[in-house]
Amino acid sequence: MTPRLVDIPALETERLRFRAPQASDFAVLEPFARSDRARYIGGGAEKDKRHAWNILTVLAGHWHLRGYGTFVAELKSTGQPIGSMGPWHPITWPERELGWTIWDASVEGTGLAHEAMLCLRRHAYQDLGWQTAVSYIDPANARSIALAKRLGCTLDSDALRNHPDNLVFRHPSPAEVLA
Amino acid sequence: MPAPTLQTERLTLRPMRAGDFTAYAALMASPRSAFMGGPYDSPAAWGLFCHDVACWALYGHGALMLDRRDTGETVGQVGLNGGPLYPETELGWTLYDGHEGQGLATEGAAALRDWAWAALPVDSLVSYAHPHNHASHAVARRLGAVEDAVAPRQDVEDFVFRHHRRAA
């Protein structure tokens, strides 16, 4: 049967609430995807509306196809969506990934991505039963590399990758995270 | 709205699943996708595939796969497309190689069109077709759609066929 987005688990942290992607997210996602800040995930100022829309439909479609997926995080205080993050596995990628993308530049440096990923990694291990997880990161994306290290990830040079230039960071095991 | 399952004389229209991707990606990599802006590599095909599914979550309408009732074989797809890339809601259809010429696209598209009249607040739908895609033009005409020369379109060269809601 087709999973339904209404079945998305209700997860939250101190400052964030996680929910399904929705059409209105495009108003926040599009300016990000078509900006230089998106260069590490294939975006950029030269990209068109189609490119940005493709990101949102891939996030939303994945939930139906896999039964789990990337959440949109919104600030509990204002309801503002600030980015997409969580467990997913695009079919052309070698293994399942824990990803994070902060759309809203104004919240960078506030620890929200770290707060989110601690919760969503636990979700992947505890609720989805993942035995391992990686994060694919552009080698020039110093901010994401710093977060991966803060999350206890280690560079896995032997792992297959989703793009030849990306680094693969492997997360601590379920036993270490759920202890 | 979750994707429905619909039945016609020869077809079951059913929700898409991840296992459909292999055949879908093969179509999108083949010359048959030229009228859809292809060919597309596998990651690009995944984007299109997810779009077809995601429309259900984002808009309450989207694509369904066509399975032959007698053999169970998946023969193609029909879809109701929307979002910021489409000027209005589009009814689209595509058949996998070897299943043309039997009226299956018309049969499947008619069922999804009739579902749209019952479920969606629209008075008409459009179908965009490449000017050289004569097989698709014929399907549109068999469905009773008429060419709309003034409808907005993404590609100025596309033909636009308009389906009008009719009293039952």
Image (cartoon, rainbow, N blue to C red):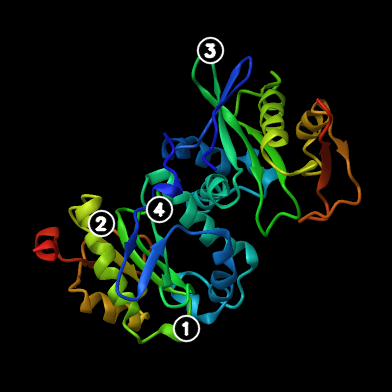
**Residues at marks 3 and 4, CA–CA distance in whole angstroms:** 32 Å
Name the residue beneath numbered marker 2: A124
Name the residue beneath numbered marker 3: B70
Sooner in the amino-acid sequence: mark 4 or mark 1: 4
Q: Front-most of B9 and B67?
A: B9
The nearer-to-camera label among 1 and 3 is 1
Q: Quadrant of residue A113?
A: bottom left
Q: Residue at x 39, y 59 (%)?
A: A70
Q: Residue furthest right?
A: B149
Q: Amino acid at mark 2?
A: Ala
Locate the N terminus of chain B by quadrant.
top right
Callout 4: SS: loop
Callout 3: SS: loop
Q: Amino acid at mark 4?
A: Pro
Disc 1: CA contacts within 10 A as few (<14), some (14-19) or many (>=20): few
**Residues at marks 1 and 3, CA–CA distance in whole angstroms:** 55 Å
Disc 3: CA contacts within 10 A as few (<14), some (14-19) or many (>=20): few
Q: Front-most of B60 and B47?
A: B60
State whether residue B160 appears in this view.
yes
**Residues at marks 2 and 1, CA–CA distance in whole angstroms:** 26 Å
The nearer-to-camera label among 2 and 4 is 2
Q: Residue at x 69, y 18 (%)?
A: B102
Residue under mark 3: which chain is it in?
B
Q: Amino acid at mark 3?
A: Asp
Disc 4: CA contacts within 10 A as few (<14), some (14-19) or many (>=20): many
Q: Amino acid at mark 1?
A: Ala
Name the mark on residue A90: 4
Name the residue beneath numbered marker 1: A105
Residue under mark 4: which chain is it in?
A
Sooner in the amino-acid sequence: mark 2 or mark 1: 1
**Residues at marks 3 and 2, CA–CA distance in whole angstroms:** 40 Å
